[in-house]
Amino acid sequence: MRIIVSDSSCIIDLGKCSLIRAVLQLPYIFVMPDVLFADELLNFGPVGKDDLRTLGFQVVELDPRGTSRAREYVAQHRALTVNDCFALALAEQTPDAILLTGDSSLRRIGTEMGIEVHGVLWAIDELERASLATARQLYDALSLCEQDSLVFLPKDEIRQRLRRLRRFI
């Protein structure tokens, strides 16, 4: 099973739109560096931090080599936060990992490094493909994302999905 290394932004956004339980049922192993889990996941919806672990979300500590790589990335990539660098280092050291992020700089750098990178809209598409959420649930989630000024997803892509899902509800 492939491993998805997530930054906090995607988990927060998926929590806000009440899709986190469904996402964690996808056929992937979801992991996050321990520093992100401790620092950035404060309050993000009806599913709490302890619930994430119960649902199978894994929190991992980078080994010393990974920590050194994260520090190197901090120096190399000024556009990334320290926590972004930890997620990048974990994705790099995890064979065949997918990096799940909403940060455009992290997406670009991860892609340049040859890491497969996706975001919230991909996760929502995966839910639809796997039939783990109804068209109504996905429509409602995307509507929330569209209206939330703190969710930075491409509005045109959200609207395109909303139009398509509207036919099924």
Image (spheres, helix red, strand yellow):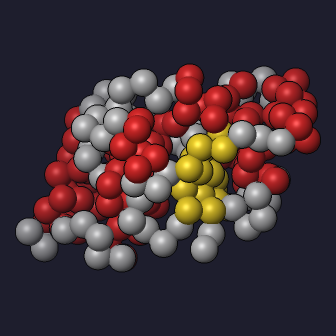
* Image quadrant assignment for residue 151: top left
> Furthest-left residue in view?
169
Residue 162 versus residue 14 in the image, above or below? below
Give the position of the C terminus as an image quadrant: bottom left
Residue 168 versus residue 103 in the image, above or below? below
Q: Residue at x 18, y 59 (%)?
A: 137
Q: Residue at x 19, y 68 (%)?
A: 134
Residue 140 shown left or right of residue 52 in the figure: left
Residue 5 versus residue 43 in the image, above or below? below
Q: Tell me residue 88's x, y (percent).
A: 73, 43
Q: Tell me residue 41's x, y (percent).
A: 47, 29
* Image quadrant assignment for residue 138: bottom left
User: Is 89 or 51 nearer to us in this picture?
Assistant: 51
User: Is 17 or 114 nearer to us in this picture?
Assistant: 17
Q: Residue at x 54, y 56 (%)?
A: 30
Q: Is residue 104 visible?
A: no
User: Is 42 or 149 nearer to us in this picture?
Assistant: 42
Q: Tell me residue 112's x, y (percent).
A: 79, 52
Residue 142 shown left or right of residue 69 in the figure: left
Q: Is residue 127 visible?
A: yes
Q: Tell me residue 1's x, y (percent).
A: 60, 74
Q: Residue at x 87, y 24 (%)?
A: 75
Residue 49 shown left or right of residue 46 in the figure: right
